[in-house]
Amino acid sequence: MNKVVIATRESELALWQANRIKELLLNAEPDLDIEILGMTTEGDQKLDTSLAKIGGKGLFIKELEQAMLDGRADIAVHSMKDVPVTIPNGFCMPAILDREDVRDAFVSSKYRQLSDVPEGGIIGTSSYRRESQIRNQFKGLTVHPLRGNVQTRLRKLDEEQFDGIILAAAGLERLGLRERIAEYLPVDVSIPSVGQGALGVECLDSRKDLRHLLSRLDHESTRTCVEMERFLSKSLGGSCTAPLGAYARFSSGGMDMSAFVALPNGTTCLRVAGRTEKLSDRGLDLSRALVDELIALGALELLSQIE
């Protein structure tokens, strides 16, 4: 193997992420010839409808996977929060990189924090997960849908279409836009999306050469946490667009995990949290315990209403 083609979406953030993987691969194998194949996915084209109504975040991924099947690309780079909890047969994720900031960020030129926005203020977000938590905790605010790449969303904010918008902090930081962040939302206020802040690299399961190469980029503790979160979502039948979040992290010699399921309008929000001092079964015992708690609270009935 002397050449690797990376499939990626063509947004500035996606290209940054692909170039980051290129840099890391060249550090591992300096003689590699690495090419980046930019692609426009169905999710990038359909910006006038919410993702929940047109097929979810998997619309950002299927064209990249097709490029690997066709032999036009060898690997694809994803934000793990955009990856469906079930990876299609024939594909694998050999690398999940060291996680960056998992928090959501409140961006506004008018207010320093979300709690400063007055009743009736308009907040923009593309995510039912964010919307449900905002509506649940800041009941006087109005939430309007906001799609597009990071620059498009910031432009709409600057045009005063919104009083503030919510974006992933990691994406803003990767693009050098940290100064746009008015407030980092604590994880107990806005529980992150499953896999938020982590990059994953996908390839065909049959490519043992690539699996070996990519495994050198894998971050074991991040993989453990992300797999725990994805297990919880999959166990509840949650999609990438469901009002569901989970966050697992190592802490003080043990592991903490929190999760929630809600209605998009925020009228019902089920939150659970747990801790284990002894990590067993890759942390899935803790994840299973939270799944059981959420089911006992009525999470499956809640999600069925959304479907």
Image (spheres, rainbow, N blue to C red):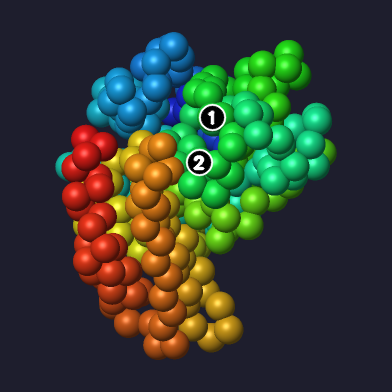
Q: Amino acid at mark 2?
A: Arg
Q: Are marks 2 and 1 in contact (CB under 8 Å)?
A: yes
Q: Which mark is residue 143?
A: 1
Question: Residue 76: image x %, image y %?
Answer: 42, 35
x 40%, y 88%: residue:
278
Which residue shows up at 70% across the image and 46% down it?
A: 115
Q: What number is the disc on residue 135?
A: 2
**Residue 191, x across and y down, in percent:** 50, 54
Q: Residue at x 73, y 17 (%)?
A: 160
Residue 49, by quadrant, is top left
Name the image quarter holding the N terminus.
top left
Whether residue 114 is visible here, answered yes or no, is: yes
User: Where residue 111 sits: x, y (%)?
Assistant: 79, 36
Determine whether the residue tagged by mark 2 lies in a helix, strand or loop: helix
Q: Amino acid at mark 1?
A: Val
Q: Would residue 69 be found to the left or right of residue 6 on screen? A: left
Residue 241 falls in which quadrant of the image? top left
